[in-house]
Amino acid sequence: MRSVIFDLDGTLADTSADLVAAANSCFRRLGLGDLLDPARDAATALRGGKAMLRLGFSRVEGFGDTAVEEEYPLLIEAYGAALAVHSRLYPGAVEAAQALRAAGYTLAICTNKPEGLAVRLMEELGEAETFGPIVGADTLAARKPDPAPFHEAVARAGGTAGRACLVGDSVTDRETARAAQAPSLLVTFGPAGGDMAALQPEALVPSFAALPALVEELSL
C-alpha cells in the first residue's frame, strides 16, 4: 500500500496562536508580560514549546535554559487546557485527504507534539479519523528527525515500507524523510513557507489543492 504521512503543526493545522498563548501564560505568571506576538512569532511557535520559551526569555534578562526546562511542563499544561481556541486546519486539507484515500493511499500523522495532545486537537477540530492514526513525540522512545516515528506511522497506516512520503513544513520534516529514505513534500503556505525551497524537497506544496497530483507524480 502507498502511504502519505502528514506532519501536524504548520502542515495540517495552523496552531501557532494557541501555542503562543500558552507560552505567554508562562511569561505572565513570571511577571514578564506577553513576550511573544502571535503573528510575528508564529514560525517559532510551530517549532515547539521549548523554542517559544527560549525566544521569549531571550528578550529579557535573567532567564536561561533552567527556566526553559522549569516552564515547559507548565506550558504544556496551559496548552492542553486551550488547544483549539484559534487553531484551524489549513484550507483544503480535508478535501486533499479524501482525494488521496480515493486514489488508494493510506494516511497517518507523524508529529513532534505529544500524542495525547495531537489526538485531542484532531478530535476538537472534528477530524479525528480523517488523517488516520497519530504517532506523536512520546509514542516511541525516538522523535523526528529520527526515522523511527515515520516508519511507525507508515506501519499503523497499513502502508508498505518504501512506498510512503512525508508532507511537512520544516527542516525537521526534511531530515526525517531523508533519514527514512522517503520523499518529502514541504508546504509553502505556512509561516516559514519562504524557507522551504532551500531545503530541496522532492516537491513544494503551494496549497492542499495541489497535493494529490504532486503525490501521484512521485510514483510511490
Image (cartoon, grey):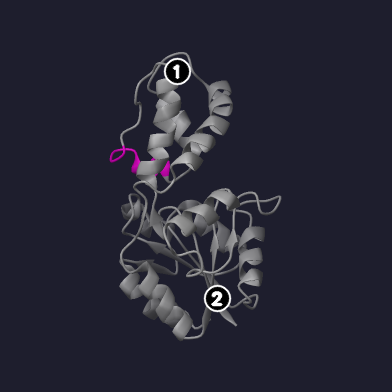
Q: Amino acid at mark 1?
A: Leu
Q: Position of residue 119 (x, y in %)?
A: 54, 56
Q: Is residue 57 visible?
A: no
Spatial CA span between label 1 and label 2: 45 Å
| SS category of the residue bearing label 2 | strand
Dot 1 lies on which element?
loop
- Residue situated furthest right in the rendering: 141
In magenta segment, residue 39: yes
* Res 30 label: 1
Q: Would you identify the image quadrant in which residue 181 lies?
A: bottom right
Considering depth in this image, is 64 or 28 the residue closer to the camera?
Answer: 28
- Whether the magenta-drawn stretch holds residue 29 is answered as no
Of tags 1 and 2, the one toward the viewer is 1
Magenta stretch in the rendered image: 38-45
Q: Is residue 210 above or below residue 78?
A: below
Horizontal side, residue 190 vs residue 69: left or right: left
Type of the residue with mark 2: Ser
Q: Is residue 39 left or right of residue 109?
A: left
Q: Which residue is mark 2?
A: 3
